[in-house]
Amino acid sequence: MTIFDKIIARQIPANIVYEDDLVLAFKDVKPAAPTHILVIPKKCIPRIAEAQPDDHKVLGHMLLKAGEIAKKAGLEQSGFRLVINNGPDAGESVPHLHLHIMGGRSMAWPPG
Ligand code: AMP
């Protein structure tokens, strides 16, 4: 069970900003931007490279909800970044798929 499964099961606390049948969104405990929210599927898909064709509904839902959550957080005009880290070179640290919503500051490209 990953730390994110424990958040879904309410075994550890999180600052939850959105929830429905398929996804949960909560504030990142170590924010790297003024707004930093994680959107996770309730189903444990370890990482995007391990998603299956049957997961297309939840994957699309994550993106749609990320846009809505970013707008609700007031980021529509200033902009925001969506990030998925997959594997060691990308810095993935929790093996439960998560989409980072980051905004509230100007960001460099390409990322470090
Ligand atoms: P990644 O490096 O892409 O795997 O991102 C994992 C993210 O999860 C990091 O930004 C962490 O700060 C965040 N994180 C780890 N534990 C928690 C937690 N208990 N609550 C909220 N965010 C967390």
Image: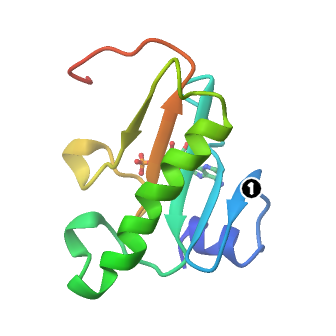
Query: Which one is in front, 11 or 63?
Result: 63
For the point 31% across and 49% down, the residue is: 85
- Work out whether residue 96 can be spotted: no
Left-right relation of 78 to 110:
right
Query: Which one is in front, 75 or 85?
Result: 75
For the point 76% across and 66% down, the residue is: 12
Q: Is residue 24 above or below residue 33?
A: below
- Work out whether residue 112 can be spotted: yes
* Location of residue 18 in the rendering, given as x and y in whole percent from the top left corner: 69, 58
**Residue lying farthest to the front in this orientation:** 77
* Location of residue 83 in the rendering, given as x and y in whole percent from the top left corner: 36, 42
* Location of residue 60 in the rendering, given as x and y in whole percent from the top left corner: 37, 66
Q: Residues within 10 Å of mark 1 (few under 14, many from 20)?
A: some
Residue type pointed to by label 1: Ile
Disc 1 is placed on an element classified as: strand
User: Image quadrant of residue 50?
Assistant: bottom left
Q: Is residue 43 above or below residue 18?
A: below
Query: Which one is in front, 49 or 19?
Result: 19
* Location of residue 45 in the rendering, given as x and y in whole percent from the top left corner: 38, 76
For the point 31% across and 66% down, the residue is: 47
**Residue lying farthest to the bottom in this orientation:** 54
Q: Is residue 92 above or below residue 43?
A: above
Which quadrant of the rendered structure holds the C terminus? top left
Left-right relation of 51 to 24:
left
The residue that disc 1 covers is: 16
Left-right relation of 77 to 82:
right
- Disc 1 CB within 8 Å of nearest ligand 1 atom: no
Q: Is residue 61 above or below residue 36?
A: below
Left-right relation of 96 to 26:
left
Which quadrant of the rendered structure holds the N terminus? bottom right
